[in-house]
């Protein structure tokens, strides 16, 4: 059995894992990545963020083209999707980014070992790749093994019932499709398949879509999508029966039952950490009752030379959180006294329109009895949004009684790009005047943040 000695081993090559490895290498330590899949990059690059955003970009372009077509601005005789070319385009995007990571691994002398890694003890990992086995001996280890789609006990085994990974393969376009779960993944996949021609039904057991977001935002978004999807809220799926021609689904809402039939079902009820796969107990790593690995502010586990980052450390399960953690843990291992202490972490739903939020929501402020003020700037008053045909959005800011920004939500085109300004403002403890007196370019969507602050101050001239 081959034995490999390294200073640091990273278990998993997702955004957090490769960011940690590259930073460690730059700081002068020998580092090895263990990755079970053929391509590095993890779920985000290969079967998550990147392929889904590629598909969403295609649907957005086609949607905008159809809007201009209806107005008679452009004339196209036939606008259709080519499913095979979409899949090929998606693969090309993924492979381009994978090759970039492979190049960086070579350039930064980061060795990638293929295979599935499990702990033998506090200083060794066993890597299996088919019939081959290797032992990696390490001084420090970083667990960056991510998460997987969550399943439900009542779901039967049927190839027509998909998780998000399988759904992104776009094997075919079902005539009628059910999506269980109205979170970020469910809403994004709904847009993709509806744009490709599927009749979409979304069922959510909770009170509303996107349970982290304020009701005024979700209510407005539901109004936008009401003609696109059939949406059932506060509704349970009581049974799914596999029939020869379709899938029979029974819903329960307020003790009322209803049965419908679908060609395919997408299960989008969240993700579960992969901590159970690596035999963490052999290294003595503590895992809580929800499956997350316990870490401190320096991302150390209870085992002093083993660290954990990304989805496996808890909510929010987001790639950009993992990247930030990866860089911090690399510096901690290299004896820098750094800590992972973000005030806020932004979230984005990449639908059209997008929804992005960061910091404290109005709902959370009310629950915690925090004195606050909210202000909304409607995009109907934005020259850029109106001229772009995207006037259905608005920007909402939340300030505490010292007039310091503590939260923000944006509903509208490119909200994911705009939310970073609010994130920075919260991190810096910006007063409303810091935002309103910072001159923004006109006409832009980013003006909406400045104008919302002006509304709060009472100096706005646009409304």
Image (cartoon, rainbow, N blue to C red):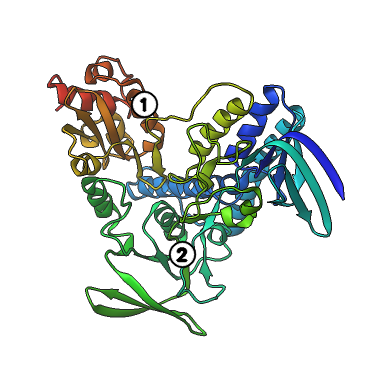
Q: Position of residue 225 (x, y in %)?
A: 30, 55
Give whichever of 366, 283 is nearer the camera.
Answer: 283
Q: Using residue 325 as the reference point, say whether residue 392 is left or right of it.
A: left
Judged left or right of residue 42, residue 103 is right
Residue 271 in sight here? yes
Which numbered disc, 1 or 2, marks the residue that appears first in the sequence?
2
Give the residue pinned by disc 1.
Answer: 421
Q: Which residue appears farthest toward the bottom when viewing the image?
A: 244
Image coordinates for residue 412, horizontal then vertical, percent: 32, 40
What is the quadrant of residue 234 in the picture? Answer: bottom left
Say if 41 sits above or below 153 in the image.
Answer: above
> How far across and down, in percent of the image, does residue 321 sit?
48, 37
How far apart marks 1 and 2 lie (CA) works out to 34 Å
In the image, residue 343 above or below residue 75:
above
Q: Residues within 10 Å of mark 1 (few under 14, many from 20)?
A: some
Image quadrant of residue 304? top right
Of residues 453 and 279, which is closer to you in this image?
279
Q: Nearer the viewer, residue 125 or 78?
A: 125
Residue 262 appears at what percent x and percent y? 43, 75
Query: Tag on residue 267?
Result: 2
10 Å neighbourhood of mark 2: few (<14), some, or many (≥20)? many
Do the numbered discs 1 and 2 sit on residues whose CB atoms are within 8 Å?
no
Reply above or below: 321 against 262. above
């Amino acid at each position: 059995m081959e034995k490999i000695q390294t200073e640091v081993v990273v278990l998993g090559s997702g955004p957090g894992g490769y960011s940690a490895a590259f930073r460690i290498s730059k700081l002068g330590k020998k580092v090895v990545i263990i990755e079970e899949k053929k391509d590095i990059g993890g779920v985000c690059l290969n079967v998550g963020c990147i392929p889904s955003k590629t598909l969403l970009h295609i649907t957005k372009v086609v949607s905008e083209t159809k809007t201009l077509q209806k107005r008679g601005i452009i004339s196209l005789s036939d606008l259709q999707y080519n499913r095979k070319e979409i899949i090929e385009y998606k693969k090309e995007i993924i492979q381009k980014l994978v090759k970039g990571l492979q190049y960086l691994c070579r350039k930064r002398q980061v060795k990638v070992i293929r295979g599935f890694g499990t702990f033998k003890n506090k200083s060794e990992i066993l890597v299996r790749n088919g019939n081959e086995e290797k032992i990696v001996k390490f001084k420090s280890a970083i667990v960056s093994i991510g998460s997987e789609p969550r399943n439900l006990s009542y779901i039967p085994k049927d190839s027509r019932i998909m998780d998000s990974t399988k759904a992104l393969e776009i094997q075919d376009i079902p005539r009628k499709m059910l999506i269980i779960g109205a979170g970020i993944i469910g809403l994004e996949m709904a847009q993709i398949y509806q744009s490709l021609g599927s009749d979409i039904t979304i069922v959510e057991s909770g009170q509303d879509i996107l349970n982290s977001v304020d009701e005024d935002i979700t209510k407005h978004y539901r109004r936008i999508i009401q003609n696109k999807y059939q949406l059932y809220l506060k509704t349970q799926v009581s049974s799914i029966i596999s029939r020869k021609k379709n899938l029979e689904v029974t819903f329960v809402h307020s003790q009322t039952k209803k049965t419908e039939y679908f060609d395919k079902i997408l299960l989008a009820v969240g993700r579960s950490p992969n901590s159970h796969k690596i035999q963490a107990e052999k290294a003595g790593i503590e895992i809580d009752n929800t499956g997350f690995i316990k870490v401190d502010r320096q991302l150390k586990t209870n085992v002093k030379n083993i660290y954990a980052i990304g989805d496996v450390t808890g909510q929010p399960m987001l790639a950009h959180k993992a990247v930030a953690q990866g860089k911090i843990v690399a510096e901690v291992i290299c004896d820098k006294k750094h800590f992972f202490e973000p005030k806020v972490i932004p979230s984005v739903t990449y639908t059209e329109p997008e929804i992005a939020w960061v910091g404290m929501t109005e709902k959370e402020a009310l629950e915690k009895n925090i004195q606050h003020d909210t202000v909304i700037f409607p995009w109907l008053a934005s020259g850029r949004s109106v001229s772009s045909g995207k006037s259905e959005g608005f920007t909402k800011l939340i300030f505490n009684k010292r007039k310091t920004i503590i939260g923000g939500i944006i509903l509208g085109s490119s909200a994911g790009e705009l939310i970073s300004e609010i994130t920075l403002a919260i991190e810096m403890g910006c007063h409303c005047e810091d935002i309103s007196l910072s001159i923004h370019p006109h006409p832009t969507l980013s003006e909406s943040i400045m104008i919302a602050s002006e509304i709060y101050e009472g100096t706005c001239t646009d409304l």
